[in-house]
Image: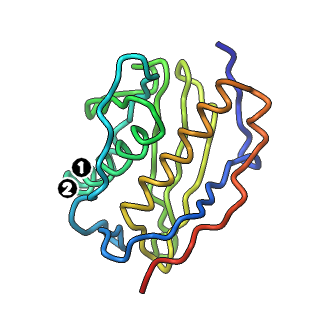
Amino acid sequence: MTSRSFLPTKVLTLLLATALLGGCAQLGGALSGEGSSTAAPVAKEDQPTICLLPNKQLKDEQLVQLQTALSAGIRAAGMNVEVLKADGTADDCDTCLSYAIVVQDKTLKGIQFQIFEDGKPTIAANGAAENGSLQLQRVALYSKALMEHYLKVKADPTAAQAQPAAQPQPAAK
């Protein structure tokens, strides 16, 4: 498999055109909220699998909430997901996804994603927070959009240049 290395200036910014539900759990200055209500399809053997790397910087409850939202988005894109153990690395699976919460000046700015193939970084992406919070539903939508893009690039490497064009809709107030 050929590895496509992304430079920091070529980070794919995920932009979704979807209205977000006002009652969804949110990630705030410290991650908080109830679990995501996103139902995920059941894994199928004929679908590709991506391993989800644990984020060691998150508290247990935060980690579970975020992994649940990410997993729901990955499955909604038509992929299986395997959550790696706490000591998991990008070399543990053929394809892995890492994620990090971005905080600047004590304000939540968003989430960063990195896909690894055979331990090498391939596709990077960012998902923006809104007014210092990030709904778990939005995290699921970001991970779904990223996985759909990843599958498109796997099928047609020239698709790596394409980026979603729509802006996310503001959350209901």
Q: Hey, which quadrant is residue 24 in on the image?
A: bottom left
Q: Residues within 10 Å of mark 2 (few under 14, many from 20)?
A: some
Residue 97 location in percent, x, y? 47, 36
Q: Residue at 63%, 59% (x, y): give it.
A: 15
Q: Position of residue 101 (x, y in %)?
A: 44, 58
Q: Which residue is mark 2?
A: 61
Q: Is residue 21 left or right of residue 64?
A: right
The residue closer to the viewer here, 103 or 134, is 134
Residue 56 numbered mark, or none: none
What kind of element bears circle 2? helix
Mark 2 and mark 1 in contact (Cβ < 8 Å)? yes
Closest to the observer, 61 or 58: 61
**Judging from the image, what secondary structure is the residue with disc 1 in?**
helix
Look at 60% across and 63% down and name the residue there: 17
Q: Residues within 10 Å of mark 1 (few under 14, many from 20)?
A: some
Residue 64's disc is: 1
**Amino acid type assigned to the residue bearing label 1 in the image:** Val
Q: Quadrant of the C terminus?
A: bottom left
Q: Residue at x 46, y 22 (%)?
A: 48
Tell me if residue 117 comes above or below residue 12 in the rendering. above
In the displayed structure, does residue 164 sit left or right of residue 72? right
